[in-house]
Amino acid sequence: MTQPMPTFDQARTDAEPLLSVRDLVVEYHTQRGLVRAADHVSFDLHRNEVFGLAGESGCGKSTVAHAITRILKPPAHIAGGQVLFDEVDVLKLNDDQLRDIRWRRISIVFQSAMNALSPVLTVGTQIADALQAHENGTAQMTRRQVLDRARELLDLVGIDPDRVNSYPHQLSGGMRQRVVIAIALALNPELIVMDEPTTALDVVVQKQIMDQIRELRNQFGFSILFISHDLSLMVEFSDRVGIMYAGELVEVAPSQAIFNDPQHPYTVRLMNSFPTLSGPRVELFGIPGSPPDLITPPPGCRFHPRCDVALAGRCQTERPGLQPIGARHMAACHLLDDKIVNKEDAS
Ligand code: SF4
């Protein structure tokens, strides 16, 4: 039998990060040349934490998520770094070891439920398949028991358990996405990677699903790596946020600090270009230009061609590194040099 899900109180809340990404480098070999889509990306994600990765399309956030779960396909290739999950480097695991942690400890929710679900199998069969493929203990479970567990999971994500016999096309877009979340929850993972989980849905359904995910997280205590280009949603939903630009992390901070006091010029402009989910109407400003071609990224700070406060000379030649600039706040910008604090003060 599958074990009952741990409650939030039972979930471990150690200070040690559950996931520690260190200097992750991912490259794509293309006909035009080598694209470094993730360039020395480092961040931690703690137990029961929601860490968001945000940025414009093509900034590398999904590449990072797929590298962590080892589902990148050629021409992508992990060229360096570590992905420590509970202190074990996921990048060094063989196929059997990977299979052992996938779904049981780390699961993923993809953007498009229609692509993630098979159109020719009922949702109950698809949940049951996930259970039987990854849970060692279900070998002895009867089909009846597995389907009962599938009904339980549907109920958990707010779908009538009788829908267990429905095919994906018989469900609305929101219900299909809930089914994908139920599959991700099937084996009580410690970490769920959510790659744009509600992007294809209208804002009302998006809000309902995000509220439901928040409730489930509070109940079961899993951690979430949340990927989105929607900064308003990201700030509302995440505990901490990392902003990516052109394959690099340029700012990492608690979401309230990103919302109230963004420090990196790119984050400031991103915040000014998104409407907030609540509060007064404000004028929005786009960011001029577009992200660089990563085959030939600009020298120095990659944001300098679009940055209206760039320093002449230095920003075009010297690449800024991510530095601590306050309590749990890091940014990569030469303008912030006088705010750099030592690492102990920042923790
Ligand atoms: Fe702008 Fe220079 Fe800061 Fe880059 S390093 S964001 S170009 S000020």
Image (cartoon, rainbow, N blue to C red):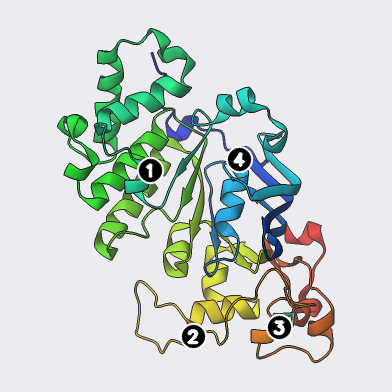
Horizontal side, residue 249 vs residue 277: left or right: right
Check mark 3 vs ligand 1: CB closer than 8 Å? yes or no.
yes
* Of the two numbered discs 4 and 2 in the rendering, the one whose residue sits closer to the viewer: 4
> Which mark is nearer the camera, 3 or 4?
4
**Up-down: is 108 above or below 247?**
above
Q: Where is residue 68 drawn, in percent x and y? A: 61, 44
**Is 37 drawn above or below residue 179 in the view shown?**
below
Q: CA distance from mark 4 to mark 2?
A: 34 Å
Marks 1 and 3 sit apart, C-alpha to C-alpha, by 38 Å
Cα separation, mark 4 vs mark 1, equals 17 Å
Q: Given the image, on which type of amino acid does mark 3 rest?
A: His
Residue named by callout 4: 70
- Mark toward the start of the polypeptide (4 vs 1): 4
Which circle marks residue 304 in the picture? 3
Circle 2: residue type: Gly
Amino acid type, mark 4: Arg
What is the crowding at mark 3: few (fewer than 14 residues within 10 Å), some, or many (at least 20)?
many
Q: Which residue is mark 1?
A: 116
Asked if residue 333 can be seen in this view, the reply is: yes
Q: Earlier in the sequence, mark 4 or mark 2?
A: 4
| Sequence-first tag of 2 and 1 | 1
Figure quadrant of residue 146: top left
